[in-house]
Amino acid sequence: MTIGQVLREPLTARAWRELLYSFLSLPLAVLGLASVVLTMVLGLLSAGLLIMPLLALTLGLDRAFGGLHRRLSRTLLGLDITTPARPPRSPGLSGFMGYHLGDSAAWRTVGYLALRAPLGLLEFVFGFAWWGYSVLFAFYPVLWKLGPSHEVDTHGVQHTFGLQLNGYYLDTWPRALALSGVGVLLLLAAPWVARVPIALDRVLLPWLLGPSRTSLRLTQLVETREHVINEAAATLRRIERDLHDGAQARLVALGMRLGRAESRLAKGDTSKAQVLLQESRQETKEIIQELRELVRGIHPPALDAGLAPALTTLAARSVIPVTVHVDLDQRPPAAVETMLYFAAAELLANAGKHSGASQIAVTVLDFGSGLRLMVADDGDGGARVDGAGSGLRGLLERVRAADGALTVDSPPGGPTAVVIDLPGRVEPHKRWLHDAWPPEQSPEDLRIRRS
């Protein structure tokens, strides 16, 4: 930190936003404490059925206070906190009670408001009050000279209006200027002092006012379940369409051709019947190949020999040279192998279309309790999950459906590295090691430079 940064900090927008937050902290802390006291009193009296609806309404008020604090933290502190999801509401009075009394986010908000009472006082004292006294001290000489009144101390000595500390009057220019210098120093330190209690608030806000890990997990499971259902429905529609428009239509044509051959044989035209039978045999081979391609989209036959041979076969079809390294202690489950294979296939296809790379590296390693797939290239970079028409978004949803994670590191100009982590147990097997990775390169190195 430089001296210039220290001098400029009190004038920054962040310092003024935090000053306003510190000023609002005291009244909000008082109101929040009153709401907590009311909640606790109604909670103790809620044995009576007439009081319980009032408790539910008070919890709704507490939750509204939590929403206000989330908005203030977003606006003044730059801390974006997701609003916790509400539990589903059932009809009737019991549904109303369960909707409010069973809301864990509301009870966590009560805990935050209780802690906010002393914390709000600290933020006000070390934020707004510190700043106010700093300004007062810094401009003390002006205030001192503007004060027309006079005071007489206990010894009968007359003093010009000014501050006094235990009978010590600051009514001379040296003393006034010294206090002004102290005020300037306190004003420079004000932003840093104010951030001490605010730092604690930054910890409490997402912990108590944000969604819990359980609710986040439930939300993720709901989203991934919907994605899996939609993905399965889309896959079934694709298979049905491919069978209807492809193999089924060709089988109908094959049957008609065989019928014509049968008719020719019945008429004794063996030469024409032989031509039709030859065409039918060729058509049969093409239909079988088409069905094999369709099945390969469901489960690649190359995976029967294991992930390493399957990825090697996949790399051989790439238009860009690909090096493959698979180093696993045990063979993964079939579902994990299939997910890794199709993910690698999509990433290789994307790299071949958009990257402009001259080399791609595919690595599969043990990572904690799961597996890690790394696909890196030395292309132009710029790949983004949220990009328009990005195929990575769909891949991300499929990885999340398998409880995995996908990260992309692709700065403009490259290189690009996509990492997929998948959890899951592995089946006891021999050690799987595929040595297609060049010995002079480390499989951990995702930063493949342009050759």
Image: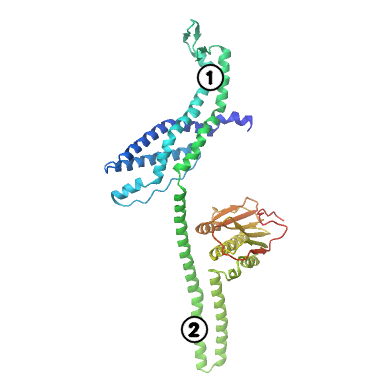
Location of residue 186 with respect to 243 vertically, above or below: above
The residue identified by callout 2 is 256
- Mark 1 — residue? 139
Residue 42 in the image, given as x and y percentages of width and height: 32, 39
The quadrant in which residue 356 appears is bottom right
**Where is the C terminus found, in terms of image quarters?**
bottom right
Residue 69 visible in rendering: yes
449, 428: nearer the viewer: 428
Q: CA distance from mark 1 to mark 2?
A: 102 Å
Location of the N terminus by quadrant is top right
Q: Tell me whether circle 1 and circle 2 mark residues in contact (CB < 8 Å).
A: no
Whole-percent x, y for residue 189 in the image:
56, 28
Q: Is 205 left, or right, of 444 in this rendering?
A: left
Amino acid found under the numbered disc labelled 1: Phe
The label on residue 416 is none
Dot 1: within a 10 Å radius of its alpha carbon, few (fewer than 14), some, or many (20 or more) residues?
some
Q: Secondary structure at mark 1?
A: loop
Residue 161 x %, y %: 49, 12
Nearer the camera: disc 1 or disc 2: 1
Comparing 151 with 120, the one in front is: 120
Residue 188 on image: x %, y %: 57, 27
User: Which comes before the other along the chain, label 1 or label 2?
Assistant: 1
Local packing at callout 2 (Cα closer than 10 Å; few below 14, some 14-19, many 20+) is: few
